[in-house]
Each structure stands twice: as C-alpha cells, then as structure tokens.
Image (cartoon, grey):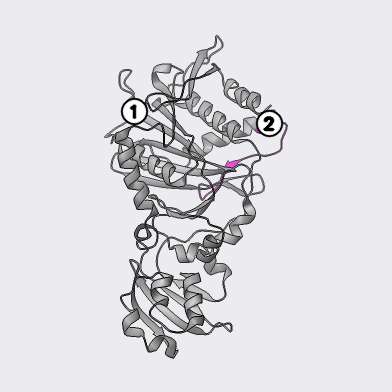
Amino acid sequence: MKSQEARRALASFPGFGLNASRRKHNRDATATSFSFSFRRQSNSSTTSKQKKLYDLEVYISRSRSPYFNLSYEDYLFKRFPAYTSYSASSTQLSKKILFLYTNYRSVIIGRNQNPWRETNVQSLRMHNVPLIRRKSGGGTVLHDEGNVNYSVMMPGNSFDRDEHALLLCTALNSVFRQRGEETVLSVNERHDIVDQNARKVSGSAYKLQRGKAYHHGTMLLNSRLDMLSKLLHHSVDSRLELVEGPGVQSVRSPVSNIGISDELFVNTAIAAFRREYTTGSDNAFRVRYVDEDSITKEEEQEINQTIDELRSWEWTFGSTPKFVHRYLFGDSTPAVSFTVKEGTILDLESNLPEFTEYKDSIIGTTYRGADVASRIDSERWKQRLIGAI
C-alpha cells in the first residue's frame, strides 16, 4: 500500500506518469539503482511564463551515515556552479539540485553554535549518539530514521528562504487531502514548516556563497520526539551548569510528526520539484542514488577528507566561539568558571582550593573532560568534569 500511495503521489501531478525500473548496482558514478522516466500526458498544462525553469538534478542517498550524507552535501555544493545571473537559455539552463537523505540517530548543531549550550553532552555519550557540527548556520536538530532531510542548491540570485518550504507545503497538503486527513502545513515567520496547531514539523538552515546558495531542512515523519528533551538544550534543563557567550542559540518550539512514510515524502518532493522547475523533459531532469559504495574514487577522496573533519574534536568542539562555562553547587552558587576559546582554557575563576591550587596548570589545557580532570586531584570534580565536558 505504501508503495502504491507513493507512486500515486508522483502520478497525481498534471502531465506526468511514473515508470521506475531497477538497475544493477555497481560503482559506476553514473549508474543509479532506479531509473525515473516521466511520460508526458495529453492533458499536460503549459508552463507558466513567469516560472523559472532549471536543469534539475536529484540525488537520493541510500546511506544512513550522517558523516557521509553531510559530507556528500558539502561535496555537491563545492561543485555547484557560481552563477552571475539566472540563465533561461534553451541550451544552458541554470542548475538546481535536490538532495534527499536520512541519517541514523545523531544530533547536528549549526556552524556557529556552542555544543555545551545546545546539547546534553553527557546524555549523548550515554545514548551513543554522535554530535556533528554542520557547515551551515541555524539551530540544533535531532536526526533519526523517522526524519528525512532535504537540501536544495540553487544560483545565489535565485535564493529565497521560503520558496522551497512553500512548495513542499503545497505538495504535502495535496497528499493529506487525498488521504482525508486534517493536517494542513504552512510556513511561519521563522521560515519553519508548521502544522495547523503551530507545531514545527520542519526546520531550515541556509548557506550562501558568491553566486550560489543552499537551503536544507528536516521533515519529521515518524521521529522519536521523546529523545529531544534527553539530548538537547542542556543549559536550559540543567540547574548545575550555565554556558554564557556569543553563538547562535536554538529556539525551542513544540514539534510534531506528519505521519507519512519516507517513500511517500521522497516521491512527493521529487514530483513537486519536477513539476515546478522543469518542462518535464528528461534532458533537464536526472536522478542518481548514492552511498559509500557507489561514489567514484575522486569523490571518495574528497568526501573522506570532509568526513574526517566532521569527526574531529577540533571541528565539533574546538571551533566553538569564546564562552564561559560555569559550574554551580546544588544551591546555584558558583563553584568554578572556565573561559574557553577555540577549545582551549583561557582563564579560570573559583574559590575552591581543588581548582585555585592548580590554576596555572589548568590554563592552556584543551577543554576536554579527561584533560581538565588530569590537572586536579579531587575525584568528585574529576567525575563531574569528565561527564559534563
């Protein structure tokens, strides 16, 4: 039933029918596991003169690794052409890319965020959930296999914060109506997609460079929302620590799932983008499935370099803007404060002999729990710092 429903989502758009056939999987970069071809129908509507058409490339990841998927996204963006202006030439349309992927459970923070403020570092370790700093701005999100991520790359002068979110709302609302459901999605003033009860189902982040840009977002389908409070917003929930300093702070919002399958969402998104941005010609529309085994040697080398960077402590924690991490007693009085910049302790303030006695040796230490704990003798504070940092 899910597969039939997903096919109907594609076929429901005027002018297109779907024919998908499997191909043998190999390492050829041009090969995909599915070949999508759309048949023009006799009742096809003409393309609006105001509509911008693009050479649309769709990439769908079969990998569940957040390191691979975020690195592949970065790879696509680096190779995306920088346009000085939109081209509607019949021989050279400007390009647009849609990249769709799902990650295993992971917490993704924005480029300019503080992981000690945005997440519960100790809980992440306890649940064996990786923490990754992405290349774009925006807030912190929880990914899991009940969530599909979409990334749209476009010429810089075509960038619009709401355009693709609105497109997805229109397409998904059509699906909900066909299913007889009451769900109605819209885009709010923060550029999030929300349901009729103002609960966020999709958040967005953006990256702009000269001549090009991308917008990527989450879509909560059947995600484990109960994990949000366990893994995120540590400084809000904890009465024993405070993190102060610059950096983008996430905005807490009520969230909800939209309750459809990932297959239905993916096919609905592809159909909507193809309808909106192409004439239906196969010459301006391509789909490629990717994962660790299907990329070329050239792609693999660069992607692995980015994966190594995303896995590194220096990128995830060490690139955090300057901040102060205050540890409190149970009665909320200060115990010790560390001033940290680029992963290194610049200063320490405390009236406790456990720290004042070793202040000189602590300053200059890398801000990792084990490294700081190795500079003091108090077992109680050793354990607390190892768990918190």
Q: Residue at (56%, 19%) from the top-left corner?
A: 14
- Kindly identify which residue carries mark 2: 177
Circle 2: is it few (<14), some (14-19), or many (20+) Cα within 10 Å?
few
In primary-sequence order, the first of circles 2 and 1 is 1
By secondary structure, the bulk of the magenta-drawn segment is best described as loop
Which element is circle 1 on?
loop
In three-dimensional space, the C-alpha distance between marks 2 and 1, rounded to whole angstroms, equals 33 Å
Task: Count the labels in the image.
Answer: 2
Which element is circle 2 on?
helix
Among all residues in the image, which is located at the extreme right? 180
Report the side of 355 relative to 103 (left or right): left
Q: Position of residue 281 (x, y in %)?
A: 43, 16
Of 352 and 151, nearer the camera is 352
The magenta stretch is 176-192
Of 369 and 74, nearer the camera is 369
- Is residue 304 highlighted in magenta? no
Q: Amino acid at mark 2?
A: Arg
Asked if marks 2 and 1 touch (Cβ < 8 Å), the reply is: no
Q: Position of residue 114 (x, y in %)?
A: 43, 63
Up the image or down, 231 lies above or below 80; here it is: below
Q: Residue at (44%, 19%) from the top-left corner?
A: 279
Q: Amino acid at mark 1?
A: Ser
Q: Position of residue 98 (x, y in %)?
A: 44, 33
**Could you say which quadrant of the image residue 18 lies in?**
top right
Among all residues in the image, which is located at the extreme top? 42
